[in-house]
Image (cartoon, grey):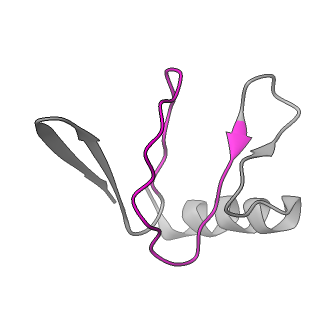
Amino acid sequence: MTNSLIDRILHLADRSGAGDVPFSTVVPGLSVVRTRAPTQLLHTVFAPVFCLVLQGEKQMVILPMVKGLHK
């Protein structure tokens, strides 16, 4: 993914007000979350999701497996 595409997506997220809490979009079922710092481990169950990591890393833990998702 090119830096210009990443910059455009981040700009869109900022413009829409996306933050640590999921922000709903006009697309049914599509939300945007943008965190600017590492977050604590969150114990939760999500419905099937698509996660696009633009910067940094996201870690998914499904015991006993730990999977790192990164750019």
Up the image or down, 60 lies above or below 13; here it is: above
Q: What predominant SS class does the magenta segment belong to?
A: loop
Q: Is 33 in front, or is 39?
A: 39
Q: Position of residue 31 (x, y in %)?
A: 72, 40
Q: Position of residue 36 (x, y in %)?
A: 58, 76
Please give left or right for residue 2 compared with residue 68 in the image.
right
> Outermost residue, left direction?
64
Q: Quadrant of residue 34?
A: bottom right
Residue at image coords 10%, 36%? 64
Quadrant where the C terminus lies? Answer: bottom left
Quadrant where the N terminus lies? Answer: bottom left
Q: Position of residue 6 (x, y in %)?
A: 56, 63
Up the image or down, 38 lies above or below 28; here it is: below
Residue at image coords 65%, 54%? 33
Q: Is 54 in front, or is 45?
A: 45
Please give left or right for residue 40 compared with residue 67 in the image.
right
Please give left or right for residue 22 compared with residue 71 in the image.
right
Q: Would you say residue 5 sits in the magenta stretch?
A: no
Tell me the magenta residue range: 31-53
Residue at image coords 72%, 32%? 30
